[in-house]
Image (tube, helix red, strand yellow):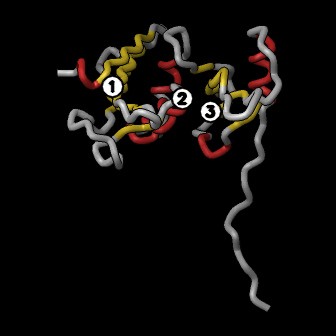
Amino acid sequence: MPTTDFGPPEPTPDTTRYEAWLTKQGKPTNGAREDVYKRFGDWGFFDRNPGAGQFVDRAALDQSGHVVRNDESADWYVFLSSPDLDAATALDLVSWLLNAAPAEPSTPGLREPKVKAPTLTKAADGTVTYQGWIHNPQNRMATRITITAGPSGSAKIVPEPANKVP
């Protein structure tokens, strides 16, 4: 009798560290979930779904307790300097964290000629710079995101709407 191979089993979500982080932040843990297909190295990607179609408190947490969110106080340097992280993977993960869709020159329906492929660079002083484009799937408006993070933990996030980019 023939057998059907459906590939590897789906990874098991583990929201333990995320729920602990939420509790430490004084936030509820209801609806906590992990997007197991976003896992990258030691990083897990989490949010809460407290109601239909609502996704809040998005964060990436690694096994060492570093946290990346959509703000400049996050551990962007640790994340962006992760071994094996390339610009294309960073585009997908950063877009998810910002609750947006990744935008590339080939994105269907996106009518923005300024959109370029993402970049991820490391300067001689250790500063890591990511630049990529995201868009809102509802209105297809593109925004360039530049994240610059230094070894000291400082980070700067600069969103620029396409109509403001030279």
Circles 2, 3 touching at the beta carbon (< 8 Å): no
Amino acid type, callout 1: Arg
Q: Earlier in the sequence, mark 3 or mark 1?
A: 3
Q: Quadrant where the C terminus lies?
A: top left
Residue at the extreme front of the image, as rendered: 139
Amino acid type, callout 2: Asn
Which residue is at 35% across, 26% downward? 143
Amino acid type, callout 3: Trp
Name which quarter of the figure residue 161 lies in. Answer: top left
**Location of mark 3 (residue):** 43
Give whichever of 31, 10 is nearer the camera. 31
Mark 3, mark 1: which one is toward the viewer? Answer: 1
Q: How many residues crowd around disc 2 within 10 Å: few (fewer than 14), some, or many (20 or more)?
A: some
Q: Quadrant where the N terminus lies?
A: bottom right
In the rendered image, residue 12, in percent from the top left (x then y), is placed at 77, 46
Q: How many residues crowd around disc 3 within 10 Å: few (fewer than 14), some, or many (20 or more)?
A: many
Circle number at residue 144: 1
Which residue is at 72% across, 54% downward? 10
Which residue is at 81% across, 17% downward? 28
Give whichever of 9, 127 is nearer the camera. 9
Left or right relative to 95: residue 125? left
Circle number at residue 37: none
Residue at the extreme bottom of the image, as rendered: 1
Residue 3 sits above or below residue 159 on the image: below
The kind of secondary structure element at disc 3 is: loop
Q: Earlier in the sequence, mark 1 or mark 2?
A: 2
Residue at the extreme left of the image, as rendered: 166
**Location of mark 2 (residue):** 99
Q: Earlier in the sequence, mark 2 or mark 3?
A: 3
The residues bearing labels 1 and 2 have C-alpha atoms spaced at a distance of: 14 Å
In the rendered image, residue 156, in percent from the top left (x then y), is placed at 41, 11
Which residue is at 46% across, 27% downward? 81
